[in-house]
């Protein structure tokens, strides 16, 4: 059975359900640091039969993870790594590569500069030069 780590659970768990449908022999662990987002995603995902192969939980990727070395065939980081400051990102990448199998695949979805320019018109952005951390506030408060 393949193992997939999905860091930054997608809204409503849509991406994780798609992974489960595309990979019927996979076990998926979907993580987030957002308790409300986790509850919302679990409620949505639980309506699909594939949910029995998805474990959703709170986990901070920038902290040591509980998994053994070389655990996952795939790691998918969706719209999460670009929110980390330099130290958190370095720690997260070390952890991701530690838990990824030697021939495993690491997929990253991140915002790009062009998207940030568009977002500046819709959101209030704050950039901290000391930490290299970008924070944005918009429709979610």
Image: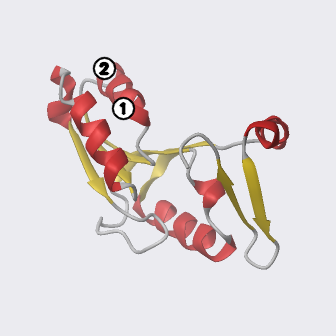
Circle 2 SS class: helix
Residue at (27%, 29%) from the top-left corner? Answer: 44
| 46 relative to 103 in the view: left or right | left
Front one among 97 and 123: 123
Label 2, residues with CA under 10 Å away: few <14, some 14-19, many ≥20: some
| Residue 57 visible somewhere in the drawing | yes
Q: Is residue 98 above or below residue 81?
A: below
Residue shown at 67% from the left, 53% from the top: 136
Q: Is residue 98 above or below residue 102?
A: below
Residue marked by disc 2: 21
Where in the figure is residue 34, as x and y percent of width and height? 39, 55
- The correct choice, above or below, for 109 with respect to 51 in the image is below
Q: Is residue 134 left or right of residue 105?
A: right
Q: Nearer the viewer, residue 49 or 73?
A: 49
Residue 12: which numbered mark, if any?
1
Query: Circle 1 — which element?
Result: helix
Q: In this view of the protein, can residue 2 be seen by the observer?
A: no
Q: Considering only vertical position in the picture, is 127 above or below 124?
A: below
């Amino acid at each position: 059975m393949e193992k997939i780590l999905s860091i930054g659970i997608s809204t409503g768990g849509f991406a994780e359900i798609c992974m489960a449908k595309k990979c019927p022999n996979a076990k998926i662990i979907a993580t987030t640091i957002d308790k409300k987002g986790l509850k919302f995603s679990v409620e949505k995902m639980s309506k699909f039969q594939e949910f029995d192969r998805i474990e959703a939980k709170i986990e901070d990727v920038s902290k040591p993870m509980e998994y053994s070395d070389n655990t996952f065939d795939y790691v998918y980081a969706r719209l999460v790594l670009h929110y980390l400051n330099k130290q958190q990102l370095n720690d997260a990448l070390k952890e991701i590569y530690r838990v990824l199998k030697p021939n495993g695949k690491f997929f990253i979805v991140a915002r790009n500069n062009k998207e940030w320019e568009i977002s500046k018109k819709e959101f209030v952005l704050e950039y901290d030069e000391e930490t290299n951390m970008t924070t944005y506030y918009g429709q979610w408060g």
